[in-house]
Amino acid sequence: MPQHHHDSTKKKQPMKPLEFSLNGERVVAEGVDPTETLLSFLRRRGLTGTKEGCAEGECGACAVVLREDDGEGGSRYVTVNSCLLMLGSVAGRELLSVEGLAREGELHPVQAAMARGGASQCGYCTPGFVMSLFSEYYRADRAAPEPRAIEGNLCRCTGYRPIYDALESLGAPAEDDVFLARLKQEPPKLGSFGIHTHTPEGERAFHRPADLHEVFHELAKHPDAKLVAGGTDVLVEANQSHRRWPAVISLEAVSELREASLDDTGLTLGAAVPLEQIEARFASALPVLGELLPLFASPLIRRRATFGGNLANASPIGDGAPTLLALDAEVVIASSEGERRLPLADFFLGYRQTALSPGEILRSVFVPRPFPDASHFYKVSKRVMDDISTVAACFCLWRGEDGAITRARFGYGGVAATPMRARDAEAALEGHALDPAHVEAAAEALGAAFTPIDDHRGSAEYRGAMVVALFERFVHDLEQAEVAR
Amino acid sequence: MKYVGQDLPHESARLHVTGEALYTDDLVTRFPGCLHAWPVQSPHAHARVLGVDASAAEATPGFVRLLDAGDVPGEGDTGAARKDEPLFPNEACYEGQPVRWALAETEEAARLAATRVVVEWEVLPAVLGVRAAIEAESYLADEIAIRRGDVASALEGAPHRLSFELLVGGQEQLYLETQAALVDHDENGQVVVHSSTQNPTETQVIVARVLGLPRSRVTCQSLRMGGGFGGKETQANPIASVAAVGAHVTHRPVRVRLDRQRDISSTGKRHPFLGRLDVGFDDAGKLVAVDAKLFADGGYSLDLTVPIAWRALFHLDNAYLLPSCSLTARAMRTNVPSNTAFRGFGGPQGMLMIEEAMDRVARALDRSPLEVREANFYVEGDKTPYGLEVRHPERIRRVWDGVLESSEYEARRAEVDAFNAAHEHTKRGLAITPVKFGISFTTAFFNQAGALVLIYADGSVQLNHGGTEMGQGLHTKMRQIAAQELGVLLDDVRLMPTRTDKVPNTSATAASSGADLNGAAVRDACQKLRARLAEVAAAELGAAVDELSFEDACVFVASSPTRSMAFGELAQKAYLERVQLSATGYYKTPEISFDEAAGRGRPFHYFAYGAAVSEVEIDGFTGQHFVRRADILHDVGDSLSPLLDRGQIEGAFVQGMGWLTREELRRDAKGRLGTRGLSTYKIPGADDMPKDFRVALLPRATEPGVVHGSKAVGEPPLMLAISVREALRDAVAAFGDQPSGEAVELATPATPEAVWRACRAIQGR
C-alpha cells in the first residue's frame, strides 16, 4: 500500500474546482479522484463513444482532442489517448470527444470520410480514428495527407486500406468551419492547479505547478509524490499494474521545463517538452532525432511523452536514452538548492534507478555541440511502428579533418538493466579510420559488451546478435551513403 | 432500385463515426445501481484451491460479495461441448483462470476486493505445449481420421519422399471490444442478458442452465460486437453466466467486463497445432501419398476443439488432390485457456501444413513452388479425401491465372531475382498461394436459420434474424436482401438488435455462414409477406399477382406502371383487410451430412476460392520485414455487397499476416502468459498494411443454390496470407545458395527473430 500523507494545511486552502471545457460546454467535476483517467470519467458520464481497447496507449480507441497553444500565438488540435490522461491534467483545458464533432445531425467531414467507404467495420476503433483524422484535418499548413496521422490507432477489422483512403480524401476545412474558427481563439492557458479528494480508496492529491519554485514547494510538502510529465508511462502503470499514488505532481505546465533552444553551445531540451515538438523544431538541426522520434512511439503518445519522463523512468527499453547517450548528452538536475549537471551516462545507476535524489527533478537535457558527423538510430521490434524495442541502438561518430574518428559514442537499449554505452567498442574505433580491421575490432568488443536477457520480445541470443548486427548495419549504411555521394 | 450487389457502407457506419453506436458495456450508465465484477485469477497453470480467505476483501469500501459455487442456483458449469468448465472452480487449470468473482459498487472497489482475496493453493504439475501433451498422453478426445487408399504402401512406392514437423502458433482474437455482459431482471423475473456474444442462443442456454431456469425465462440480446472473430462464439458464455449469478443473488443489475489483460489471460485463442507429415511425390512434384498427423493444443477444456480439428483435416488438402492419404488429428489437453474458434476454425492450420509440404517438395526437386502447386490442383471430377466431389474446381485456375496476370507475376519474378542478385543484405521474395475453403458448419444441424419480419401498417419494416453483427456487415446485407425482396427503400427497413425472443434456437454467427443462412431465411420471410401483399395489391390494381412489381416503396403493374400504389398504402390496406403482416422465415442448407466414424460425407455446401501474390522484403541484419505488395483475386460468388466483401478480404488478409508474421503468444516455463496486452502482443498496425494492396473479386462467379448467387467471405481470405509466409521463405532462400535441394526452414510466426534465425541457418550451410 502506498503511504498516505496527512497535510494539515489542505483543508484550509480554498481550492478551485476541477473544471474544463468538453465539446464546448463547461464541466465542473466535483468529488472526483483527480488521478482517475479521463477515459473512465467520460464513460462514467455516459459519453461512451470514447472506447477502451487496451488502457495502455497502444490502440487509440480512447482518443480525444485537446486544443493547445501552438507556441506561435495561435492554437492547434492535438489528438491524445484519454486512457493516459489523469483527470487532473485536463483542468483548465479545452477538449473534444467524438460526440462533439457532428453539428445538428450533420457529420463532420472527417466522420463523413470514415463513414463513406468502408472504413468502419465493427466500429469500435472508429471514434479513435475519427479523432486522429480530426487533428490531421486542421493541421496547420497541411498540404498533403500525413499517413503517420493514424499510426497511433489500431484496427482489427479493416486491414487499414479504407482508413488510409478516408485520410487521403480529406479536403481543407471550409472557411466558416466552427472548429477552424475556434483555432483562432486564445488557447487555454494551463495555470497552476491543485486538488485533494478523499475517495473510498484513500487520499488523492493532484498538483500541477506552473513554475519550478512551486514544484519544490509541493515536493517539500509531498516528498513521496509521484512526478508525472506526459504520463504516458505512469498511466500505464496505473492502468495495468493498478498502482495508485496518494499524491501526484504533474510537471507538464512548469514553464522552465517546457523551454527548448538551440544555440552555439548546443541543444537544450526542457524535460517536459513533448517529443512531437522536439521533432518538429529540431530534427533538421539534429537529423538523428528525426530517425528516432517516429519510431519512439505513436503520434498520440509523442504528443504527450517527454524526454524527461523517458529518462527519469530509467526503463532499460526506453528509446530516448540510447540516442541521447550516443549524442554525449548531459542532464541538468534541479532542486530547491540549485542545479547540477551530470553526463547522461552517469545518470542511470541500476534497473529503473537514477542519480536523482529526493527533492530533485530532471530539468533539462543538453546535447552539446559539435553534433556528430555521422549518426543513425536503429530499432529492432516485432512491429516497426508503435512497438517497444527488443534492441535499440544509436551510433554517433565525430571525425577529424583526415577522416579519422575522433570520438565514437554507441548507445544501446534493451540489452542490459539500464540503457548503456558500449565503451570498449567506442574505444576500438577512436583515433582510427572506419576500416575493416577497426570495424571488426569494434564488432568484437560489442559481442562481449552486454549480457542481455530472454523475454517475450526476444531471446538473449537474438538480442546479443542484434548488438553487433545493428553496428554492422550502421557501417553498411555509411558505406552506401558514401557510394551514393 | 436493386440493393443486392450495390456498394453500400456498413449500416451502422454513421453510428460508428459519431460514437453513438452502442456496445454492451456502453449500457452500464443506463442501469442505475449496476454492480461491477472482477475476477480472482489463478497465478498457477495448475493448482488446487485449498482455501479462500475473503476477510480483507470484505473490508474494502463498496464490496458487495464474493461469488462462488454456492451462489449458483442451477448447474455451475458453462462448458458448451461438455460439462468441463466449472464457473467457480476449486481446481485451476490454467494461469489466469478466474476461480471467484468479487462484486462491488464500483469497478475500482471490485478490483481492489478481488486482489485482497487470499487463496491458498496447492500447486499441481502442469502440461504446457502440444509436445508435452503428446508426451504425457494428455488428450481431450479420441483421434479423428480421414483416410483414402493404402497410404503406407503408396508412400513406399513413391518415387520421392520427405517428412517434416511443423509447429503452428496460436493467435489471440484481439477483438477491440473485450468480453462484456450485463444482466438485469425484467418484469416477472425474466432474466435479460446483454452480451457481446456471437451466439445469443447458446449464451441464453448456458445462462438458463446455470440459473436452473427453462430457456423461456432468459432473453439474450447482442446489440453488436466490437469484433468477434470466433472469440465470442462460446467464450462469451461464462462472462454472461457470472453476471447472471451476480444479478440472481443481489437482485441488482450486474456488469462483467474484462479489461484487456484479463481478457487475454483468461480466454481461448486460435489453436496451436503440431503437424507431422510424411509425403510421397513423383518427379513432377505431384503428390502420391500424404500421411499427416495433427495435434491441436486444445487448452484445458473441450470447447470447440474437435470440430476445429475436423476442419483442419478438411482443409489439409487445400486446393490439391491427395491421391492416397491418412489424415488424423487429436485434441490435446494442456494447462492454458481453452483454445477456441478463430476465423478459419482450424482450416488455416491444416492448410498451412500442405503449403509447407508444397514448398518442401518443390525445393527437394529444384522446381519452382509455383509449378509444383499447379501440378497438384484439383480438376473436374476429383474428390476430396472425405469423398466430396470438388464443385467448380476450374475456379482454382481462374483465380490463380487471374492473379498471376494482374500481379504481373512473371515480370516481377525477374525483378525480384535481379534485386536479390544486386543486394547482399536485403532480399525480396515473391510467392503465390491458393485457397479453397469449405462453406457450412461441419456439424450438420447448425446449418439452419430463422428470421422474423414485421411490416407495420405505415409500410415501415422491422427486420429480425438470428445472426449477430460483429463488423462483418451481416446486418447491412440482410437489409439489402429484405429491402429488395419487399421492394421498399433501404431506410424503410429497420434492423433490430439480435435477440433470442425474436428468433429462437439460432446457430452461432460463425463458419462464414451468417449471410448464407440468415439471408435465405430473411428472403423466405419477405417472400411470404410479399405474396400476401401481392394478393391485396392485385385486387386493388385489378391485375394478376404475377403481373406486379415491388420496387422503390411502390407496387405497380409491370406492363402499365401508372397503375400503382405506395407500399405504405398497401400495408394499410392489407391491415384493414386483416392480412397478417408478420412472417417468420426459415432456411436449412440442403444435403449436408458427415459420417465422423467413416470420415466420409458432404460437410460443405460449396467451396470459396481465392489466390494471392505477395512480395516481401527482408533486412538481413535484423530479420525485420515488410510486405511490398499484395494482389488478391477472390471468389465471393455474385457479391451481395462488394464494398463489404472487399473489406472482409482485406481485413482477413491483414489478420492472417498478423498470425503468420507478428503475433506471438509467449508463456514462461510455468505457463504464465507474458504477452497479455497490446504493448507486448503486436497485431498489425497501419504501417504493416501491404505498401501496395490490390484486391479484386472474381467476376462471373454466380454460385447456384446460395442466396442471390453469393458466397461466404468471412474466413476464406484469411488464408490468402499464407502467400506472405511463402514469400518470406522465398526471400530467406535468397540469402543462401540456390538451388540447394534442401528445405528452407521457417518458424511460425515468422517474427523478425524467426526470420533472422532462418536467414542465419541458410547462410550457415
Image (cartoon, coloured by chain):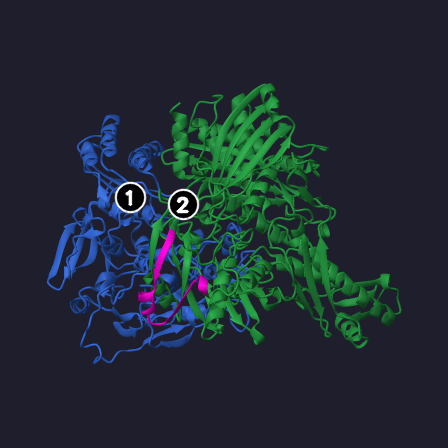
- Image coordinates for residue B486, horizontal then vertical, percent: 74, 63
Secondary structure category for the residue under label 2:
loop
Numbered tag placed on residue A414 in the rendering: 1
| Residue type, label 1 | Gly
- The verdict on residue B56 being magenta is yes
Relative to A364, is A456 on the left or the right?
right
Numbered tag placed on residue A383 in the rendering: 2
- Please provide the residue range marked out in magenta: B48-70
Q: Quadrant of the C terminus of chain B?
A: top left
Shown in blue, the chain is: A
Camera-nearest residue between A470 and A164:
A470
- Image coordinates for residue B500, horizontal then vertical, percent: 62, 64
Near mark 1 (Cα within 10 A), the count class, few <14, some 14-19 or many ≥20, is: many
Shown in green, the chain is: B
Q: Chain of mark 2?
A: A
- The verdict on residue A482 being magenta is no
| Residue type, label 2 | Arg
Relative to B66, is B654 on the left or the right?
right
